Amino acid sequence: MDQRFDKIDQQLQELHKIFLKSQKDSPAQPSTSIVSHHRSMKLDFPRFTGDDAMTWLYKAEKFFTLYNTPDEQKVSIASIHFEGKVLPWFQLLEKAHQVADWPSLSTAIQI
């Protein structure tokens, strides 16, 4: 029985060492526990039909911040969630190369 406890204790110590090494190797992030908690939740990206643009932009920005979305992915993620009259409008902007990044899309939506 003592041998089993010794083996379990040894495995726990090794797991602890691995955990400590992973913490040391990864860059320090403020409020890691909060970020981890949010990432365990699945939040749906808001759909956009053209109504209430400012509210949609606010929600999109919050989503991007929460999930640390890289800038180069924001336009693609947002456009996948366009519906109704917004989709052909976006396709025209995209074809005319007027939405190179998130700030340009955000500005176009506000106009």
Image (cartoon, helix red, strand yellow):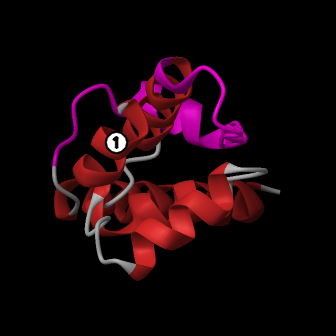
Query: Dividing the picture into quarters, in which one does residue 49 lie?
Result: top right
Q: Which residue is mark 1?
A: 106
Q: Is residue 41 magenta?
A: yes
Nearest the eye: 100 or 92: 92
- Specify whether 107 is left or right of 48: left
Report x, y in % for residue 79: 57, 61
Q: Is residue 44 left or right of residue 104?
A: right
Of residues 110 and 24, the one nearer the viewer is: 110
Measured along the vertical axis of the image, is residue 34 above or below residue 82?
above
Q: Residue furthest bottom?
A: 95
- The residue lying at 41 percent from left, 58 percent from top is 74
In what quadrant of the picture does the C terminus appear?
top left
Label 1 element class: helix
Q: Which residue is depicted at the point 56% across and 32% down?
A: 38
Q: Is residue 36 left or right of residue 18?
A: right
Rendered view: 54 above or below 85: above
Residue at 30% in and 77% down: 97
User: Residue 108 in magenta?
Assistant: no
Query: Bounds of the magenta span?
Result: 28-54
Crowdedness of circle 1 by 10 Å Cα count: few (<14), some, many (20+)?
Answer: some
| Horizontal and vertical percent position of residue 83 | 76, 52
- Amino acid type of disc 1? Ser
Q: Position of residue 60 (x, y in %)?
A: 50, 36
The quadrant of the picture occupied by the N terminus is bottom right
